[in-house]
């Protein structure tokens, strides 16, 4: 898996090939000191993230469901025009 990733295969493609979540692949790569490439959201993921957030999920809940970093998701949905709710303080 590491060789495939370092050869340019995406973490998403690897997750599909191995039948696991993308976060699992990224965790394995990081645990093996592999430098992980930036993981931008696809337009479909941005739409889904915005929909989930606007339906009431928190940023962290929506990010977890999409197996992405919360900050990556936050930046993407703001860029897509989604207004963030005030923090809840949880």
Image: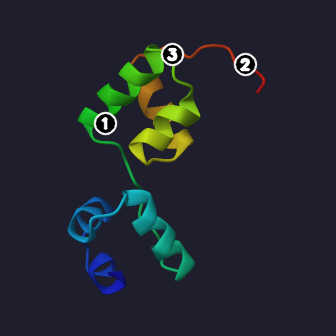
Quadrant where the N terminus lies?
Answer: bottom left
**Above or below, comparing residue 72 to residue 13 in the picture:** above
Q: How is the image coloured?
A: rainbow
Query: What residue is shown with label 2?
Result: 88
Residue shown at the point (48%, 39%) measured from the top left: 63
Q: Residues within 10 Å of mark 2 (few under 14, many from 20)?
A: few
For residue 8, which quarter of the picture?
bottom left
Q: Residues within 10 Å of mark 1 (few under 14, many from 20)?
A: some
Q: Are marks 1 and 3 in contact (CB under 8 Å)?
A: no
Q: Is residue 35 shown left or right of residue 20? A: right
Q: Which mark is residue 56?
A: 3
Q: Is residue 48 shown left or right of residue 88? A: left
Q: Which mark is residue 45?
A: 1
Residue shown at the point (51%, 13%) measured from the top left: 83
Whether residue 79 appears in this view of the structure is no
Q: CA distance from mark 1 to mark 2?
A: 24 Å
Observer-nearest of 58 and 30: 58
Residue shown at the point (27%, 41%) measured from the top left: 42
């Amino acid at each position: 898996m590491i060789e495939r990733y370092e050869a340019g295969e995406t973490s998403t493609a690897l997750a599909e090939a191995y039948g696991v979540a993308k976060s699992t692949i990224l965790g394995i790569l990081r645990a093996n000191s592999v430098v992980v490439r930036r993981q931008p959201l696809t337009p479909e993921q941005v739409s889904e993230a915005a929909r989930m957030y606007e339906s009431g999920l928190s940023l962290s809940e929506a990010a977890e469901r999409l197996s992405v970093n919360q900050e990556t998701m936050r930046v993407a949905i703001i860029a897509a025009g989604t207004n963030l709710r005030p923090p809840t303080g949880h």
